[in-house]
């Protein structure tokens, strides 16, 4: 039987509570940087080789950050719908969470409900994201 908590998440195995807490706060801080539309703050959470995979393909770090820096891509909201599922495997961590967000690209508003999976690696004592993958969430069955 898993060691569950009241919020529905599982307690981390093997004494990795510090990594889990740190990664959860890091993901929250990264989301705040995205909503602040601050390319430098956003970049601080990404490894140089970071890419995002979405329905439109693969976008690299420099291209993504250039969209933010130019103002072509902005976010006004980003909220976690589920607690993050965090799994640490040595110096690699997987963080999966369902989020809703409001973005503006090229002047058009986009409201999204997505599952996101971020792959983090620990280098020189710091966690940096190397890959983000987003998948649109299925609409509720009764809609």
Image: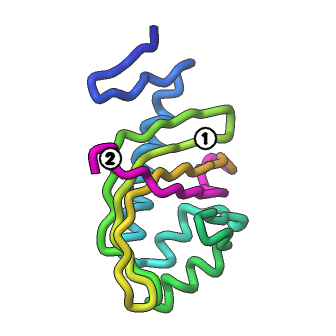
Q: Is residue 17 above or below residue 135?
A: above
Name the residue nearer the viewer: 61 or 109.
Answer: 109
Q: Residue 85's spot in the image, x, y percent?
A: 47, 36
Q: Quadrant of residue 4?
A: top left
> In this figure, which residue is indicated by the disc labeled 2?
140
- Residue drawn at x 66%, y 64% as measured from the top left: 50
Q: Residue 53's spot in the image, x, y percent?
A: 63, 63
Question: Is residue 14 toward the left or the right of residue 102 in the image?
Answer: right
- Residue drawn at x 53%, y 20% as measured from the top left: 13
Crowding at mark 1 (Cα within 10 Å: few <14, some 14-19, many 20+): many
Q: Is residue 33 above or below residue 63?
A: above
Task: Indicate yes or no whether the magenta region holds residue 138.
Answer: yes
Name the residue nearer the viewer: 124 or 80.
Answer: 80
Question: Is residue 27 toward the left or the right of residue 55 in the image?
Answer: left
- Residue drawn at x 47%, y 71% as measured from the top left: 41
Q: Which residues are magenta?
A: 124-143
Task: Indicate yes or no whether the magenta region holds residue 1.
Answer: no
Q: Residue 83's spot in the image, x, y percent?
A: 36, 39
Q: Which mark is residue 115?
A: none
Element class at badge 1:
strand
If you read the primary sequence from the N terminus, does the residue marked by circle 2 or circle 1 appear first? 1
Q: Which mark is residue 93?
A: 1
Q: Is residue 130 above or below residue 34?
A: above
């Amino acid at each position: 039987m898993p060691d569950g908590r009241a919020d529905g998440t599982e307690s981390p195995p093997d004494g990795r509570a510090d990594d889990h807490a740190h990664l959860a706060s890091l993901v929250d801080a990264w989301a705040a940087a995205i909503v602040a539309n601050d390319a430098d703050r956003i970049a601080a959470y990404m490894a140089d080789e970071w890419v995002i995979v979405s329905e439109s393909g693969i976008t690299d770090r420099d291209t993504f950050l250039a969209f933010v820096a130019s103002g072509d891509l902005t976010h006004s909201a980003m909220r976690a719908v589920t607690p993050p599922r965090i799994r640490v495997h040595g110096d690699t961590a997987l963080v999966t969470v369902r989020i809703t967000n409001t973005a503006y690209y090229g002047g058009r508003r986009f409201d999204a409900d997505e599952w996101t999976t971020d792959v983090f690696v620990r280098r020189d004592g710091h966690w940096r994201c190397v890959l983000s993958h987003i998948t649109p969430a299925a609409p509720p069955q009764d809609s």
